[in-house]
Structure formats: C-alpha cells, structure tokens
Image (cartoon, rainbow, N blue to C red):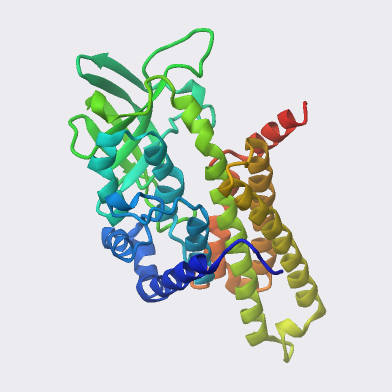
Amino acid sequence: MRRDLFDDDHEAFRALAREFVEKDVVPHYPNWEKGGRLPREVFEKMGELGLLGMAIPEEFGGGGMPDYRYDVILQEEAARALVTLSTVRTQLEVILPYFLHYANAEQRTRWFPGLASGTLLSAVAMTEPGTGSDLAGMRSTAVADGSDYVLNGAKTFITGGMQADLVVVVARTSTDPDDRRKGLTLLVVEDGMPGFTRGRELEKMGCKVQDTAELSFVDVRVPAANVLGEVGEAFGYLGHNLPQERLTVAVGSVAQARSAIAAAIDYTKQRKAFGSPVASFQNTKFELAACSTEVEAGQAMLDRAVQLHVEGELSAADAARVKLFCTEMQQRVVDRCLQLFGGYGYMMEYPIARLYTDARVTRIYAGTSEVMKVIIAKSLGL
C-alpha cells in the first residue's frame, strides 16, 4: 500500500542508508555474526556519513533534525538487506533520547560530539537479575558521598554492554515505603571507572550481531556531574521513553516480516518440487497472500503510530497496542515463510533462519506481550 510517512529529505537519507548497508554491512555481516558484535569502526563510519547524529544539535556535529522517521528508515534499510543494526538501533532510539532530554549544557558539550561521530558508544543498564519488567523493584543503589554517588549493583541483558564507553545506569538513591517508583536516578558510568566490570557476554538464541552483557558495579564512585536529569526522577524518565522504545521494536518487526516474505517469494520461485516451482502451488500463493495482508495491516498501524509519535501524541496504550500486534504478527509471518523453505529453512546459511531466531525476542524485550496486554486493559478501564 502507498505510504505517506516520508518526504524528499527522508528519501535522500534512505538512499544514503541503503548505499551504506549494501557496501559496508552486507559483505562483512557473516564475520560480524561469528564475532558477536558490530565492530567500533562501523559506528565511526556511520558517524562520518551523518547516519548517527540526525537528532543531535548541529553545534555538536549532529544533523539538528530530531525526527524519529530517520531512525525508522535505518531499520527498514537494514531489514531490506536481510541484516540488522540492532546495537545501533538501541543507541539511537532507546539510549540517545535520555541524553537529548535530560543532559545539561556541560554534559552535552562533553558527550554529544562523540555520540554523533560514533566514537562514544553507549548502553542503558535497567534490567537486574530477578526483576525483569518490574523496574520499581530495582535493587541497585547509589549513595551520596560528598560530590560523588557510590554505586553498587548488578545488571543483566545489557545490549552493547561489552563495548559501551557510557552506561546509563538506573539505581535507587532513596526509598519511599509508600511509593516504590520514587527515588530512582540515572547515572552515567564511564568506561574505566574503578569498580565497574563487565561480566559474562551472554550467548543468545538470535540477535547474534549484538553483544549482550552482564555488568557489575562495586563501590563505583560516580561524580554528581554524571547524573542525568533530576535525582530521584528516573522512573518518570523511563516511562516517558518507553513508547518510543516499544515503537522501535514494532518498526523492526514489520520491516523484518516484510523481508521474510520477499525472501520466501524469491526462494519459492527458484525451488522446484514435483517438477514445478514451489511458488506455483496454490498453498504457497495462499500462504504468502495471507502473510502480505498481515504485514500491510501492521504497516498501516505502525505508520499511524510513527506519525503520532513525531507529533508528540503517541500514548503509552497505543504504543503497547502497536508493539503487541506487530511483534505477534512478525512471529506468525516469519514462521509461515520459513515453512515454505522446507528443510533448508532450518539451516542457518539461509537468512530466513536468522529472521526466525531474531524474531522470538521481540515479544519479550521492551515489555513482554503480557505486559502490553496489561497496559491496554488499563486503558479500557479494566
């Protein structure tokens, strides 16, 4: 279906992103999968091209265009080429907003040039062992001591944690027995601070080109100058950014489901069974027609949500609806497309297998499908 989401500037950016992905990502992607991460030089190359800093003010080397649609385009172009830039996505769409919204003038001068150029990599450390989606149950603590905060705690499932120069850590700086949400603070821990260590690099089912780490903080002295925003207000900050984080997952889900269909069409046209192309069978046609319809429905819902987000009007409940529908749809579509590959669909040499394993986590991170249903139900007065 025709989309009305992008203008000429967006399409020029798309052409640049497409060229970068085809030239600088696709040929090297298998090696990056084996290595378990995107090399630092990839971020620096993207910084040189202006692909990383569109939302960062021009005075710091960015594009001065805080328009979420540029992030959408990056995801779509990666998916189109049957690859992912998931660590980049996390930095741009999940972590950078915390810096953009809450960094003070001194912090902007200190960190924004490196974030725009790709020489400073970032991660956000929220999830703790045993807490999952219960952010208010966070046990990491940061105790004021002179001009520092002494940070102690452990974090897990941290995307980009092995390479990050800056880690935005959520920790409890005070306790209110009547309100668990109060007293959480964002602190930026910098690489090399004594007591900050990187633990295991976790082995995952999918998302092989994004490192996922366990991080430990033992008596880490974090200067008060590294507090993002106001002390004790982090829960509200997290809630403010969650709609975009969930929208981000939905963008990838729709783009990758669309790529699964394209891969299945290409494969079934070439693959023969019983003397005829698999694409000529009625079942193949019906399956792909049904999948295409689901993707177009998800795309229409997603594009409307992106437009609302650009206008500052996307609600938490609508973001939950979009994430729920698009991630569940992705799982159905990728599974049905893989089936059309037969036994070859189970082989990792075919991108459809990677699309399948990568898809499973989208119904878990940024809030599980069950959490999305709770949010939606509350919006219905239930």
In the rendered image, which quarter contains the C terminus?
Answer: top right
163 w.r.t. 49: above or below: above
Q: Is residue 12 visible?
A: yes
Question: Going 46% across and 48% down the picture, which residue do you hit?
Answer: 93
Question: Going 57% across and 63% down the picture, which residue do you hit?
Answer: 6
Seen as rendered, the residue at the extreme bottom is: 275
In the rendered image, which quarter contains the N terminus?
Answer: bottom right
Question: Going 28% across and 23% down the picture, which residue do you hit?
Answer: 151
Q: Is residue 361 visible?
A: no
Q: Quadrant of residue 94?
A: top left
Nearer-the-camera pick, 303 or 294: 303
Question: Going 43% across and 11% down the picture, which residue do you hit?
Answer: 175
Image position of 290 (left or right of 161): right
> Residue 334: x, y in percent?
64, 63
> Residue 33: x, y in percent?
39, 63
Could you tell me how many numbered marks the image carries? 0
Image position of 68 (left or right of 188): right
Q: Quadrant of residue 188?
A: top left
Image position of 181 (left or right of 116): right
Nearer-the-camera pick, 259 or 67: 67
321 w.r.t. 228: above or below: below
> Residue 95: x, y in percent?
41, 43
> Residue 207: x, y in percent?
46, 55
Nearer-the-camera pick, 295 or 117: 117
